[in-house]
Amino acid sequence: MNRSPLVVAATVAGLALALGFRPHATGPTSASSAGLTTGNAHVSGAQTVVGSDQALAGGLGDIQVKLTAANGKIVSVGMAKMNLHGPQSAQISNNVIPQLQQQTMASNGGPIHAVSGATYTSKAYATSLQAALDQLKGGSNAALATSNGNGSVLQPPRGGENDG
Amino acid sequence: MGTVVSFSLREAERTTADGAAVRDVAAEAALERAEAKLRWVDEVFSTWKPQSPVSRLRRGEIELDAAPPEVAEVLELCRTAREVSEGWFDPWSMPGGLDPTGLVKGWAAERALDEFKIAGVPAAMINAGGDIAAYGRPAAGRPWRIGIRHPLAEDRLLLMVELDGPGAVATSGTYERGEHLIDPHTGAPAYGLLSATVVGLDLAFADALATALFVSGGRLLERISRLAGYHGFTVSGDGIVRATRGLPVALKTAA
């Protein structure tokens, strides 16, 4: 939380929902459900909520999404934290990528609006964002119950779940 | 589990005479329509729902003209994508029969985004399971900044691309769902790359081309470099990144 904030200075409202789009065939799907915590919520005038996906925390690090709202309106969304560890990271970093990374702000934390590529990571992103949103939407307590880090799967903000 | 879709909207800034902010009800209504549209597309195009028109088409139970007209529209786009991708994207060569899924998700996201354009929302972005389409700017003078996931480290970004105005980013890889991308020439799972990303004007095509680029093992990159309005890059198993010239990588500027 003390890191420099990755702020998107915009009037941005976010919302996530779950749909039943599928990949082509029957590959093993990632079965783990995201157990989300939003234990780091800070409420003080402007409200900042950090959602973290525990399912990601074991192997390769964790990803957190930070969402700031003022008067119930979201004013910034950003990655609060990206841990960099894991042997594969080093393996792939030996090559061209560091040069590209030098050109990007990915490593030093520029504002980020979305993550492409990863059904899983962007899912973690979206559900974390959603957890934070739910928390904001519910004022405080109501939505906390759905995202309290005990392994419960988050529900879409409205409407039904996909075909499961 | 399905795909999670998230939206980011920049609402029109309206205030009352005494300066109080006014809710953008048009944006809220558009959001509901966008969500409804996505659910409708899922009902029609899902290859997992046995009673969807596309599933019935696959089984030969109905003809194309008995399906909603959008199915024919999507299949036409699929034909174009097949041509442009030199056959590396081919919904007609999938095991199990016709499968336009590789283009449908991006197409659906674009149709959802249309709702915001129609409603006069100044800028919006949709992230459909890691495939992103956007228009406008998140704030005056700022582009949308899209992090591309590191194919081997889910908590890490490989690089960042920028969309200044309308654009799309799609990434294909097998790191997430297992070997689910099929080489249409062999019918077997595609190997060789860790991930393939296409940045372009339209997410339906970017989505299809990212799939094609991936299963081509990167051979399609040269073709994509000659497509107006499209860029791409691949990450191979040995960590080599190959990119088309002009990929809109976010340059390091004043933070």
Image (cartoon, coloured by chain):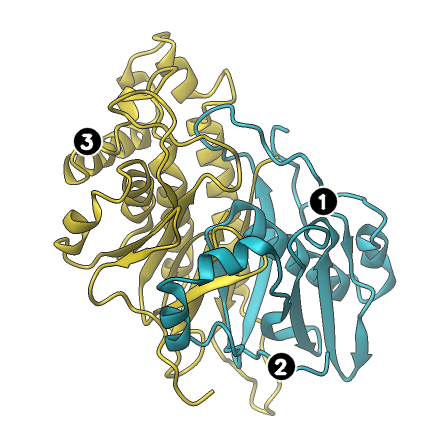
Chain colours: A cyan, B yellow
- Of B156 and A31, which appears nearest the observer? B156
Measured Cα–Cα span from mark 2 to mark 1: 28 Å
**Quarter where residue A68 is shown:** bottom right
> Residue B183, can we see it?
yes
Read off the chain for label 1. A
Type of the residue with mark 1: Gln
**Residue at 37% from the left image edge and 61% from the top image edge:** B117
Mark 1 residue element: loop
**Residue at 15% from the left image edge and 48% from the top image edge:** B223
Question: Pointer 3: what residue?
Answer: B87
Measured Cα–Cα span from mark 2 to mark 3: 45 Å
User: Do discs 2 and 3 share a chain?
Assistant: no
Question: Pointer 2: what residue?
Answer: A5
- Along the horizontal axis of the image, is B169 left or right of A105? left
Type of the residue with mark 2: Pro
| Image location (x, y in percent) of residue A128 | 67, 57
Q: Which circle's residue, 2 or 1, is located before the other in the chain?
A: 2
- Along the horizontal axis of the image, is B217 left or right of A46? left
Q: Nearer the viewer, mark 2 or mark 1?
A: 2
Type of the residue with mark 3: Gly
